[in-house]
Image: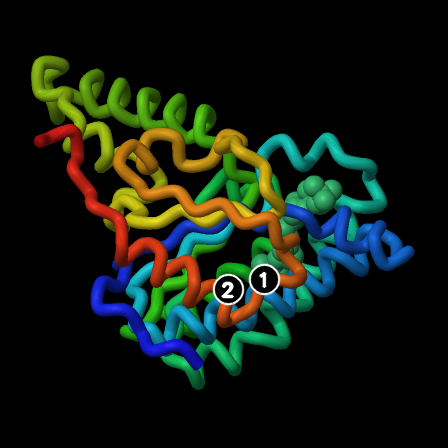
Amino acid sequence: MAAAPKTIPRHIAIIMDGNGRWAANHGLPRIKGHEKGADAVRACVEACGELKVEYLTLYAFSAENWQRPKTEVFALMRLLEKFLKEKTAELLEKNVRLQAIGRLTDLPLNCQRQLHESIERTAGNDGLTLVLALSYGARLEIIDAIQSLLREIEAGHIDKAMINPDLFSKHLYTRYYPDPDLLIRTSGELRLSNFLLWQLSYTEIYVTPKLWPEFGKEDLRAAVADFAQRQRRYGVV
Ligand code: FPP
Protein backbone atom coordinates (compact mmCIF):
# COMPACT_ATOMS: atom_id res chain seq x y z
CA MET A 1 0.00 0.00 0.00
CA ALA A 2 1.40 3.42 -1.02
CA ALA A 3 2.21 5.81 1.87
CA ALA A 4 -0.32 8.59 2.39
CA PRO A 5 0.87 11.82 0.76
CA LYS A 6 1.40 14.83 3.04
CA THR A 7 -1.21 17.03 1.37
CA ILE A 8 -4.57 15.37 1.78
CA PRO A 9 -7.56 17.08 0.12
CA ARG A 10 -10.21 18.05 2.68
CA HIS A 11 -12.97 17.43 0.19
CA ILE A 12 -13.00 15.00 -2.76
CA ALA A 13 -15.84 14.98 -5.30
CA ILE A 14 -16.26 12.10 -7.75
CA ILE A 15 -18.13 11.72 -11.04
CA MET A 16 -18.55 7.95 -11.05
CA ASP A 17 -18.75 7.20 -14.76
CA GLY A 18 -18.48 4.03 -16.83
CA ASN A 19 -20.77 1.51 -15.11
CA GLY A 20 -22.64 0.83 -18.36
CA ARG A 21 -19.44 0.39 -20.38
CA TRP A 22 -18.01 -1.94 -17.75
CA ALA A 23 -21.15 -4.10 -17.97
CA ALA A 24 -21.08 -4.10 -21.80
CA ASN A 25 -17.38 -5.10 -21.77
CA HIS A 26 -18.33 -8.09 -19.63
CA GLY A 27 -21.44 -9.00 -21.64
CA LEU A 28 -23.68 -8.11 -18.68
CA PRO A 29 -26.82 -5.97 -18.34
CA ARG A 30 -26.19 -2.33 -17.33
CA ILE A 31 -27.56 -2.82 -13.81
CA LYS A 32 -24.75 -5.30 -13.11
CA GLY A 33 -22.36 -2.42 -13.81
CA HIS A 34 -24.20 -0.25 -11.28
CA GLU A 35 -24.09 -3.08 -8.72
CA LYS A 36 -20.35 -3.40 -9.20
CA GLY A 37 -20.21 0.41 -8.98
CA ALA A 38 -21.81 0.24 -5.54
CA ASP A 39 -18.92 -2.02 -4.41
CA ALA A 40 -16.47 0.62 -5.67
CA VAL A 41 -18.32 3.22 -3.55
CA ARG A 42 -17.68 1.09 -0.47
CA ALA A 43 -13.94 0.83 -1.25
CA CYS A 44 -13.64 4.59 -1.83
CA VAL A 45 -15.42 5.45 1.40
CA GLU A 46 -13.02 3.16 3.23
CA ALA A 47 -9.94 4.67 1.53
CA CYS A 48 -11.12 8.23 2.27
CA GLY A 49 -11.67 7.29 5.92
CA GLU A 50 -8.15 5.84 6.13
CA LEU A 51 -6.61 8.96 4.53
CA LYS A 52 -8.60 11.23 6.88
CA VAL A 53 -10.34 13.01 4.03
CA GLU A 54 -13.11 15.08 5.66
CA TYR A 55 -15.74 15.16 2.87
CA LEU A 56 -16.48 12.85 -0.05
CA THR A 57 -19.23 13.91 -2.48
CA LEU A 58 -20.42 11.29 -4.97
CA TYR A 59 -22.49 12.04 -8.08
CA ALA A 60 -24.83 9.07 -7.64
CA PHE A 61 -27.84 10.18 -9.69
CA SER A 62 -28.16 13.33 -11.77
CA ALA A 63 -31.32 15.33 -12.46
CA GLU A 64 -30.83 14.27 -16.11
CA ASN A 65 -30.63 10.55 -15.20
CA TRP A 66 -34.45 10.44 -14.81
CA GLN A 67 -34.56 10.41 -18.63
CA ARG A 68 -32.90 6.95 -18.77
CA PRO A 69 -35.14 3.93 -19.51
CA LYS A 70 -37.65 3.37 -16.67
CA THR A 71 -36.23 -0.09 -15.92
CA GLU A 72 -32.75 1.35 -15.34
CA VAL A 73 -34.05 4.22 -13.18
CA PHE A 74 -36.11 1.76 -11.11
CA ALA A 75 -33.14 -0.58 -10.71
CA LEU A 76 -30.88 2.31 -9.64
CA MET A 77 -33.40 3.45 -7.02
CA ARG A 78 -33.70 -0.09 -5.68
CA LEU A 79 -29.93 -0.37 -5.57
CA LEU A 80 -29.66 2.90 -3.66
CA GLU A 81 -32.26 1.79 -1.12
CA LYS A 82 -30.57 -1.61 -0.71
CA PHE A 83 -27.14 0.02 -0.37
CA LEU A 84 -28.39 2.33 2.38
CA LYS A 85 -30.27 -0.45 4.17
CA GLU A 86 -27.30 -2.81 4.13
CA LYS A 87 -24.44 -0.37 4.62
CA THR A 88 -25.70 1.95 7.34
CA ALA A 89 -24.33 -0.34 10.07
CA GLU A 90 -20.95 -0.25 8.34
CA LEU A 91 -21.09 3.55 8.07
CA LEU A 92 -21.78 3.69 11.81
CA GLU A 93 -18.88 1.35 12.53
CA LYS A 94 -16.54 3.43 10.33
CA ASN A 95 -17.68 6.71 11.94
CA VAL A 96 -19.03 8.02 8.59
CA ARG A 97 -21.73 10.71 8.62
CA LEU A 98 -24.12 10.43 5.68
CA GLN A 99 -25.60 13.50 3.99
CA ALA A 100 -27.37 14.11 0.67
CA ILE A 101 -27.78 17.01 -1.76
CA GLY A 102 -30.16 17.48 -4.68
CA ARG A 103 -33.92 17.62 -5.18
CA LEU A 104 -34.41 14.74 -2.75
CA THR A 105 -38.21 14.96 -2.85
CA ASP A 106 -38.02 13.68 -6.47
CA LEU A 107 -36.88 10.27 -5.14
CA PRO A 108 -39.41 7.46 -4.60
CA LEU A 109 -40.89 7.66 -1.10
CA ASN A 110 -39.31 4.45 0.20
CA CYS A 111 -35.89 5.72 -0.96
CA GLN A 112 -36.48 9.05 0.77
CA ARG A 113 -37.48 7.26 3.99
CA GLN A 114 -34.41 5.02 3.96
CA LEU A 115 -32.16 7.96 3.11
CA HIS A 116 -33.47 10.07 5.99
CA GLU A 117 -33.21 7.13 8.37
CA SER A 118 -29.56 6.53 7.39
CA ILE A 119 -28.80 10.27 7.65
CA GLU A 120 -30.35 10.43 11.13
CA ARG A 121 -28.65 7.28 12.36
CA THR A 122 -25.21 8.51 11.29
CA ALA A 123 -25.72 12.17 12.29
CA GLY A 124 -23.57 11.87 15.43
CA ASN A 125 -20.50 10.53 13.60
CA ASP A 126 -17.52 12.86 13.32
CA GLY A 127 -15.29 11.03 10.81
CA LEU A 128 -15.71 11.26 7.04
CA THR A 129 -18.84 13.07 5.78
CA LEU A 130 -20.19 11.15 2.78
CA VAL A 131 -22.44 13.35 0.63
CA LEU A 132 -24.59 11.61 -2.00
CA ALA A 133 -25.70 13.86 -4.86
CA LEU A 134 -29.15 12.51 -5.78
CA SER A 135 -31.48 13.96 -8.40
CA TYR A 136 -28.78 16.61 -8.45
CA GLY A 137 -28.16 19.21 -11.15
CA ALA A 138 -25.90 22.22 -10.65
CA ARG A 139 -28.02 24.55 -12.75
CA LEU A 140 -31.10 23.59 -10.71
CA GLU A 141 -29.10 24.14 -7.52
CA ILE A 142 -28.13 27.64 -8.68
CA ILE A 143 -31.77 28.43 -9.57
CA ASP A 144 -32.86 27.12 -6.12
CA ALA A 145 -30.23 29.39 -4.49
CA ILE A 146 -31.54 32.42 -6.41
CA GLN A 147 -35.13 31.60 -5.33
CA SER A 148 -33.97 31.26 -1.73
CA LEU A 149 -32.18 34.65 -1.89
CA LEU A 150 -35.26 36.29 -3.41
CA ARG A 151 -37.41 34.93 -0.55
CA GLU A 152 -34.95 36.41 1.98
CA ILE A 153 -35.06 39.77 0.20
CA GLU A 154 -38.88 39.77 0.02
CA ALA A 155 -39.06 38.91 3.73
CA GLY A 156 -36.77 41.88 4.44
CA HIS A 157 -34.06 39.69 6.01
CA ILE A 158 -31.38 40.85 3.58
CA ASP A 159 -30.84 43.68 1.13
CA LYS A 160 -29.97 42.88 -2.49
CA ALA A 161 -26.77 44.92 -2.14
CA MET A 162 -25.54 42.26 0.32
CA ILE A 163 -25.36 39.55 -2.35
CA ASN A 164 -21.76 38.45 -2.87
CA PRO A 165 -20.08 35.06 -3.54
CA ASP A 166 -19.98 34.20 0.18
CA LEU A 167 -23.67 34.89 0.74
CA PHE A 168 -24.57 33.10 -2.50
CA SER A 169 -22.63 30.00 -1.37
CA LYS A 170 -24.71 29.96 1.82
CA HIS A 171 -27.84 29.39 -0.26
CA LEU A 172 -26.49 26.38 -2.18
CA TYR A 173 -27.27 22.78 -1.13
CA THR A 174 -23.58 22.52 -0.20
CA ARG A 175 -23.62 25.40 2.31
CA TYR A 176 -22.37 23.17 5.13
CA TYR A 177 -19.31 21.88 3.26
CA PRO A 178 -16.08 23.45 1.98
CA ASP A 179 -15.62 23.54 -1.82
CA PRO A 180 -14.03 20.36 -3.21
CA ASP A 181 -10.22 20.41 -3.44
CA LEU A 182 -10.08 17.49 -5.85
CA LEU A 183 -12.53 16.30 -8.52
CA ILE A 184 -12.07 12.77 -9.83
CA ARG A 185 -13.82 11.62 -13.01
CA THR A 186 -13.57 8.04 -14.18
CA SER A 187 -13.89 6.57 -17.69
CA GLY A 188 -11.86 9.30 -19.39
CA GLU A 189 -14.60 11.81 -20.25
CA LEU A 190 -13.47 15.44 -20.07
CA ARG A 191 -16.62 17.20 -18.90
CA LEU A 192 -18.37 18.37 -15.73
CA SER A 193 -21.85 17.07 -16.60
CA ASN A 194 -23.71 19.71 -14.56
CA PHE A 195 -21.94 18.73 -11.32
CA LEU A 196 -21.13 21.36 -8.64
CA LEU A 197 -20.53 24.08 -11.26
CA TRP A 198 -20.19 26.89 -8.69
CA GLN A 199 -18.19 24.89 -6.14
CA LEU A 200 -15.59 23.50 -8.59
CA SER A 201 -14.24 26.95 -9.59
CA TYR A 202 -10.77 26.32 -8.08
CA THR A 203 -10.85 22.54 -7.77
CA GLU A 204 -8.00 20.39 -9.12
CA ILE A 205 -9.29 17.92 -11.72
CA TYR A 206 -8.08 14.33 -12.08
CA VAL A 207 -9.41 12.19 -14.93
CA THR A 208 -8.63 8.48 -15.19
CA PRO A 209 -9.49 6.14 -18.07
CA LYS A 210 -10.51 3.46 -15.54
CA LEU A 211 -14.22 2.67 -15.51
CA TRP A 212 -15.92 3.31 -12.14
CA PRO A 213 -16.48 -0.38 -11.22
CA GLU A 214 -12.69 -0.93 -11.63
CA PHE A 215 -11.73 2.09 -9.52
CA GLY A 216 -10.30 0.83 -6.26
CA LYS A 217 -8.57 2.05 -3.12
CA GLU A 218 -5.16 2.23 -4.83
CA ASP A 219 -6.65 4.37 -7.61
CA LEU A 220 -8.05 6.80 -5.06
CA ARG A 221 -4.67 6.93 -3.36
CA ALA A 222 -3.01 7.59 -6.75
CA ALA A 223 -5.39 10.51 -7.37
CA VAL A 224 -4.60 11.94 -3.93
CA ALA A 225 -0.86 11.53 -4.55
CA ASP A 226 -1.24 13.37 -7.87
CA PHE A 227 -3.17 16.14 -6.10
CA ALA A 228 -0.30 16.51 -3.60
CA GLN A 229 2.01 17.49 -6.51
CA ARG A 230 -0.26 20.29 -7.74
CA GLN A 231 0.42 23.95 -7.07
CA ARG A 232 -2.83 25.70 -6.35
CA ARG A 233 -2.77 29.38 -7.22
CA TYR A 234 -6.39 30.58 -7.11
CA GLY A 235 -5.62 33.08 -9.88
CA VAL A 236 -2.79 34.71 -7.91
CA VAL A 237 0.89 34.66 -9.01
C1 FPP B 1 -22.55 6.40 -14.47
O1 FPP B 1 -22.34 5.28 -15.25
C2 FPP B 1 -23.12 6.07 -13.19
C3 FPP B 1 -24.37 6.38 -12.75
C4 FPP B 1 -25.34 7.11 -13.57
C5 FPP B 1 -24.89 6.02 -11.44
C6 FPP B 1 -23.88 5.89 -10.36
C7 FPP B 1 -24.34 4.82 -9.47
C8 FPP B 1 -23.53 3.96 -8.81
C9 FPP B 1 -22.07 4.05 -8.78
C10 FPP B 1 -24.09 2.82 -8.05
C11 FPP B 1 -24.99 3.16 -6.94
C12 FPP B 1 -24.48 4.21 -6.04
C13 FPP B 1 -24.70 4.20 -4.72
C14 FPP B 1 -24.30 5.35 -3.88
C15 FPP B 1 -25.32 3.06 -4.08
P1 FPP B 1 -23.08 5.19 -16.65
O2 FPP B 1 -24.28 4.35 -16.47
O3 FPP B 1 -23.32 6.56 -17.20
O4 FPP B 1 -21.98 4.45 -17.50
P2 FPP B 1 -21.74 4.57 -19.06
O5 FPP B 1 -21.39 6.01 -19.36
O6 FPP B 1 -20.59 3.63 -19.30
O7 FPP B 1 -23.01 4.11 -19.73
Q: Which sits in the foreground, 164 or 187?
A: 187
**Quarter in which the C terminus is drawn:** top left
Residue, far top: 161
Check disc 2 and report the residue beneath it: 219
**Quarter in which the N terminus is drawn:** bottom left
Snapshot colouring = rainbow
Against 214, is 233 above or below? Answer: above
**Can you tell which quarter of the image residue 32 is in?**
bottom right
Secondary element at image label 1: loop
Location of residue 129 in the rendering, given as x and y in whole percent from the top left corner: 35, 64
**Can you tell which quarter of the image residue 232 is in?**
top left
Secondary element at image label 2: helix
**Amino acid type assigned to the residue bearing label 2 in the image:** Asp
Which residue appears at 46% of the width and 75% of the height?
A: 46
The residue carrying mark 1 has its beta carbon less than 8 Å from ligand 1:
no
Q: Which sits in the foreground, 91 or 47?
A: 47
Whether residue 235 is visible here, answered yes or no, is yes
Which residue appears at 76% of the width and 35% of the height?
A: 68
Whether residue 60 is visible here, answered yes or no, is no
Q: Label 2, label 1: how many angstroms apart (C-alpha)? A: 6 Å
**Amino acid type assigned to the residue bearing label 1 in the image:** Phe
Check disc 1 and report the residue beneath it: 215
Which residue appears at 55% of the width and 71% of the height?
A: 42
How many C-alpha atoms fall within 10 Å of the one at disc 2: few (<14), some, or many (≥20)? some
Location of residue 166 in the rendering, given as x and y in whole percent from the top left corner: 15, 32
How many C-alpha atoms fall within 10 Å of the one at disc 1: few (<14), some, or many (≥20)? many
Q: Is residue 97 left or right of residue 15?
A: left
2 and 1 marks in contact (CB < 8 Å): yes
